[in-house]
Amino acid sequence: MNKTASRLLPAILIGVFITSETYAATEWNVSLWGKRRAFTENVEKLAELVEAKTKGEFKLNISYGGLSKSRENLDGISIGAFEMAQFCSFYHTAKNPSITVTELPFSRTLSLTRVAEIYTEVFKHPIVKKDLARWNATLLMPTPLPQYNIVSKGDAIQGLGGFKGLRVRGPGGIMGVLGKLGAVKTGVPFSEVRQSMDSGVIDAASFAPHAHLATKSYKVGKWYTTNLNLGSANCPVVVNTDALNSLKPAHREALLGSVDEALAFYVKNYEENTTGKYQKAVVDEGLTKVTFTQAQTTELNKLSESVRAEWIKKYAGKFDSQALFDFTTELFEK
């Protein structure tokens, strides 16, 4: 080896070492939005567990809106702008069509634990993994949510015909059904829901309890539904695949091995603290309760069947939508 090469070799080795250590960073940036709430407790608990298990060697730095807009989190993951993020599939269905299958109205009331199990199995499906791989993303864990219900302004509806012309902010599956009843899907940012209801941009918001609490929709609402039962949103936590693959084994084990515990904590916290608070809030504010009759529920379920069929047809050319739908249906029916 000549002298020049011998002088360069240590520098090259140092450079490789630094690059490797930088790539396998033990601090990950996590992009969320809004404020810390029941919806984000799975991520908060995961960060706590990972740091404890690695004795501080691996940290998840959580940011609420400081890294990206909520509807751009998947894009940020794809380019490695941050290593972990949460997003809702209905924010951009074209970017993640496969996981919207879970947002279809399956007309089932399930425990949050079961919802988490269903979503986890769907995330493992080859069609779904391939779909998210386009964004260099690996689905890490679900954010299980209860069935969505509506809080709305104005006079309480007297029947399903009352949805005609109602401007509603809500996810695809629910709005697919309500749209057939004449409701108008109206998109506004999560942080602007209460303001939009107050100013008349939207008439109603369809949310799980935590989001009604976070947006305080009930402060401007006049009525709420109790048993809409048309599904909820799928808002998974994803990681940049390259970042995940670059983790040293102990850190990867700490991350993946903490998912179940983080989800269990999330479910317990949601069921014990959030649902009850929401019920108390709508009662204290004097909102009128709207509960659909069996006949109305039957009509909603019939409309749900057509929405599910439309989803299969819409995505048949992109992937085997029938196979993914059948797989998901079986999970919901178990």
Image (tube, rainbow, N blue to C red):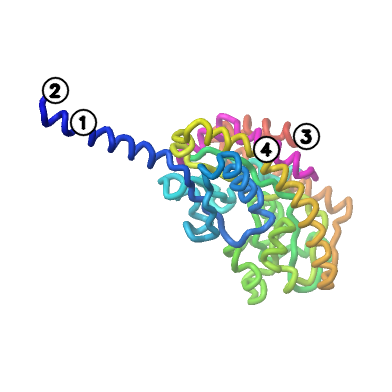
Q: Secondary structure at mark 1?
A: helix
Alpha carbon separation for disc pair 3 and 2: 69 Å
Q: Is residue 166 above or below residue 208?
A: below
- The residue under label 4 is 260
- The residue under label 1 is 9
In which quadrant of the rendered view does residue 56 lie? top right
User: Pointer 3 and pointer 1: residues touching (CB < 8 Å)?
Assistant: no
Residue 128 among magenta residues: yes
**Residue type at numbered disc 2:** Met
**Residue type at numbered disc 3:** Glu
Where is residue 91 drawn, in percent x and y? Answer: 56, 53
Question: Quadrant location of the C terminus?
Answer: top right
Q: Is residue 307 visible?
A: no
Q: Nearer the viewer, mark 4 or mark 1?
A: 1
Q: What range of the chain is rendered magenta?
A: 107-136
Q: Is residue 285 above or below residue 177?
A: below
Alpha carbon separation for disc pair 2 and 4: 54 Å
Q: Residues within 10 Å of mark 1 (few under 14, many from 20)?
A: few
User: Pointer 1 and pointer 2: residues touching (CB < 8 Å)?
Assistant: yes
User: Pointer 4 and pointer 1: residues touching (CB < 8 Å)?
Assistant: no
Where is residue 230 drawn, in percent x and y? Answer: 74, 50
